[in-house]
Image (spheres, rainbow, N blue to C red):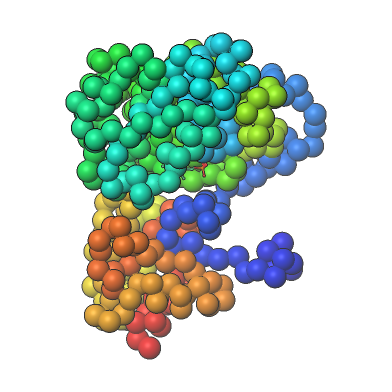
């Protein structure tokens, strides 16, 4: 019996997304081995952290990097760094930021704020969140002495009604603002690991380790300017400050840096082709066995560089009902259902091969056919 079965659960097949609620992604064998090895010996943790962070900076072509417990921790630590800099007395006072010279963080207002709850994490630090009309001019006008930074959230859905990073970051840098980007799920391409910072000029950028990078689910990465990364570390574990709540163990550090190395080393076309091969197999089975129409998308749900297979079922067959059906199977399968915020038809589903292996293609395709044909 496997571990999940011993807990009375069935491991499921993930044909949808690197959702946190499904376990994010799966670590490769080499990553799992690194975690096991790290768990077998003691080490000087400060030195391990230095080495891992230096290596992460190198792999992501950034000046500096810090490995933390998730993009969420990255949001909090970045906000603290922008408010406190290297002032240790202020780091000690977080989350009472009321007396700080810089204690306000700007975010764009707009429809996306209701869809993406992550901006609220900035508030953990005591920062006052200032939501401005989503234009570059309004954000620059709101920038004043007490502004610590502006935080941006790229992604096709989130940027639907706000200026995108390509326009906004250079404009905010010209206006002298500190810019932090939460690009937690904006991978692949791996080049996004340096796009927002070294190419567009953002001061810090944050990624999830447990989504597309395929590291431990409890890891995250902050990359960018050395001074701000050093400031993040002042509040981070092992210091007994707010970031002590975000402790990365030796196992996570080992797993994360191994996964990151593998992620940046995989050629983009190979990663894309691997997913395309799986989706093509599903597509052939579906179109031969069920009255559906299919279409390949060259973009992921949030605009990432990965293929998706769109499947339109006959009218009346709802993607949400399909998912309820496939989740009841053994093994359960999670298929891609667009939430209402995407404004897609109810009979459209998406299939994503990022977390699929070749031998799961037939299982997924057959389950979809069985639902459509029943
Ligand atoms: C997933 C996500 C987060 C949270 O990331 P964790 O690594 O799970 O903490 C933050 N911001 C965005 C935009 C995300 O997609």
User: Residue at (39%, 82%) from the top-left corner?
Assistant: 371
Can you see residue 74? no
Residue 169 vs 175, above or below: the answer is below
**Residue 309, position in %: x, y?**
31, 62
User: Residue at (39%, 17%) from the top-left corner?
Assistant: 146
Q: Nearer the viewer, residue 347 or 104?
A: 104
User: Residue at (45%, 22%) from the top-left corner?
Assistant: 103
Residue 251 vs 194, above or below: the answer is below
Can you see residue 121? yes
State the quadrant of the C terminus. bottom left
Q: Quadrant of residue 230?
A: top right
Q: How many marks?
A: 0
**Residue 234, position in %: x, y?**
60, 18
Q: Nearer the viewer, residue 373 or 81?
A: 81
User: Residue at (52%, 77%) from the top-left corner?
Assistant: 328
On the picture, is 159 further left or further right than 35? left
On the picture, is 216 further left or further right than 39? left
State the quadrant of the N terminus. bottom right
Residue 192 vs 272, above or below: the answer is above
**Residue 128, position in %: x, y?**
43, 29
Q: Nearer the viewer, residue 48 or 238?
A: 238
**Residue 150, position in %: x, y?**
35, 26
């Amino acid at each position: 019996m496997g571990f999940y079965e011993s807990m009375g659960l069935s491991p499921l097949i993930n044909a949808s997304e690197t959702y946190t609620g499904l376990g994010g992604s799966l670590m490769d064998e080499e990553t799992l081995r690194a975690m096991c090895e790290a768990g077998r010996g003691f080490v000087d943790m400060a030195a391990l952290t230095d080495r891992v962070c230096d290596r992460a900076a190198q792999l992501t072509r950034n000046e500096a990097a810090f490995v933390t417990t998730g993009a969420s921790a990255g949001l909090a630590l970045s906000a603290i760094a922008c408010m406190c800099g290297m002032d240790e007395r202020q780091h000690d006072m977080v989350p009472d930021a009321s007396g700080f010279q810089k204690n306000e963080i700007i975010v764009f207002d707009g429809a996306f704020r209701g869809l993406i709850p992550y901006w609220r994490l900035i508030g953990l630090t005591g920062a006052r969140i200032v939501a401005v009309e989503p234009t570059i001019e309004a954000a620059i006008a709101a920038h004043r002495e007490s502004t610590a930074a502006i935080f941006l959230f790229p992604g096709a859905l989130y940027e639907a009604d706000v200026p995108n990073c390509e326009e906004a970051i250079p404009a905010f840098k010209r206006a002298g603002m500190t810019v932090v980007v939460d690009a937690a799920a904006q991978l692949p391409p791996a080049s996004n690991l340096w796009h927002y910072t070294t190419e567009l000029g953002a001061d810090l950028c944050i990624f999830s380790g447990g989504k597309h990078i395929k590291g431990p689910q409890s890891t995250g990465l902050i990359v960018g300017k050395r001074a701000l990364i050093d400031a993040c570390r002042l509040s981070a574990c092992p210091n007994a400050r707010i970031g002590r709540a975000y402790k990365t163990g030796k196992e996570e550090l080992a797993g994360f840096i191994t996964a990151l190395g593998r992620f940046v080393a995989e050629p983009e076309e190979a990663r894309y082709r691997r997913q395309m091969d799986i989706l093509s197999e599903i597509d052939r089975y579906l179109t031969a066995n069920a009255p559906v129409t299919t279409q390949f998308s060259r973009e992921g749900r949030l605009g990432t560089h990965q293929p998706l297979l769109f499947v339109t079922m006959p009218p009346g067959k709802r993607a949400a009902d399909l998912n309820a059906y496939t989740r009841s199977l053994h093994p359960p399968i999670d298929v891609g259902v667009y939430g209402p915020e995407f404004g897609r038809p109810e009979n459209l589903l998406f299939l994503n091969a990022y977390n699929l292996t070749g031998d799961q293609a037939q299982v997924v395709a057959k389950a979809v056919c069985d639902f459509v044909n029943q």
